Amino acid sequence: MTTPAIAANGLRKSYGDKTVLDGVDLTVPEGTIFSLLGPNGAGKTTAVKILSTLVSPDPASGEIRVGGHDLAADPQAVRAAIGVTGQFSAVDGLITGEENMLLMADLHHLSKREGRRVATELLTRFDLADAAKKPASTYSGGMKRRLDIAMTLVGNPQIIFLDEPTTGLDPRSRHNMWGIIRELVTGGVTVFLTTQYLEEADELADRIAVLNDGKIAAEGTAEELKRLIPGGHVRLRFADPAAYQNATTALHDITRDDEALALQIPSDGSQRALRSVLDRLHTAGIEADELTVHTPDLDDVFFALTGSTTVPSQPKEAVR
Ligand code: ADP
């Protein structure tokens, strides 16, 4: 067995009396994409900052190894093995894309000639050659992220942390970024990706861990996670808030989505189950404006594990 790219045991972090990470275990095999998935504020960035040596874990944490090096004993070796891009981007808007790249090359002690070669190669690879001489502040969101990744690759890292790489990007730039991330792994790099988007984790990740309340609520491949949810559901949507309210009082065992005026009833999607749902609606005198049948997807897993609008606490206990 090869050494995992990342192995963390009992990762803990508190700020004052707020526990952000409450004993998180992570193992990421080399050359794979691992996604840490969680709602806003779950602690994803904190995990990335710790694993990339920017923030110290609490002393009560267990052993953390990144790139085969002990994080506490040899942070320098960890730093040499990794690249980090994301919310705390290294891109300087006042200078051009090319100058940003050359600055990176200097930091990594490349010769002038080698630095220029690497910069040109990476700018071309990330479709930034035409914009190379323009200030980075004039770049679009997608271009800035691409430059950020290109800058990270100057150091030839084995492990790359991407903290919410597509948050705020339009759909086209997002798909473009997905292609770039896939390509990184083809080159042998390990990717640790945080995201709020289930679709993104589903698309890219070999393994996914769902972070909730400072703990890993579930971990596995997208398929394994989907199997955690016993069945699909029937979704009822209402145009009239009053009709929606009536339905939520009349029906039990439902998950509410107050914003969309929609509710979900667990169901395996069979004709028999569907008939029983329709009977319940008929008996309660409920008329929905839209009825759709869903087989389980990653959304169901996510809501079951992290959802707070569940009435009563739906399969949360069952899936743990
Ligand atoms: P995510 O990346 O999943 O959105 P974060 O890791 O950024 O979550 O934040 C997790 C929690 O930790 C939040 O409640 C945030 O307010 C808190 N937090 C993060 N950094 C600090 C800090 N330096 N001091 C105090 N609280 C912090």
Image (tube, helix red, strand yellow):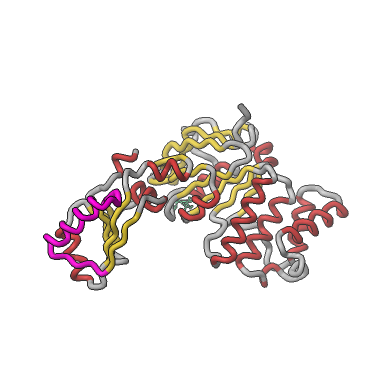
Residue 141 is a magenta residue: no
Where in the figure is residue 49, as x and y percent of width and height? 55, 46
Please tell me which residue lies in front, 165 or 61. Answer: 165
- Quadrant in the picture for residue 123: bottom right
Q: Is residue 1 above or below residue 97?
A: above
Q: Residue furthest front?
A: 271
For residue 311, say whether it is visible.
Answer: no
In x, y percent, where is residue 305? 36, 46
Considering the image in quadrants, where does the C terminus appear? top left
Q: What residue is shown at x 31% (from left), y 66% (from top)?
A: 259
Residue placed most toward the observer, 76 or 221: 221
Span highlighted in magenta in the image? 266-289
Question: Is 229 displayed left or right of 223 in the figure?
Answer: left
Horizontally, is 122 left or right of 196 in the view?
A: right
Residue 296's spot in the image, x, y percent? 37, 50
Question: Which residue, as the protein is rendered here, is positioned at the far right?
Answer: 113
Where residue 173 sits, quadrant-wise, is: bottom right
Residue in the picture at 18% in, 62% down: 247
> Is residue 278 left or right of 237 when viewed as pictured?
left
Q: Nearer the viewer, residue 269 or 11?
A: 269
Going 60% across and 46% down the picture, which residue do you hit?
Answer: 191
Q: Position of residue 110 (x, y in %)?
A: 82, 49
Q: Quadrant of the N terminus?
A: top right
Q: What's the residue at 17%, 65% (across, down)?
A: 286
Residue 5 visible from this viewpoint: yes
Rendered view: 16 above or below 246: above
Count of picture labels: 0
Determine the image quadrant of residue 281. bottom left
- Judged left or right of residue 290, residue 90 is right
In the rendered image, residue 282 lying in the magenta stretch gets the answer: yes
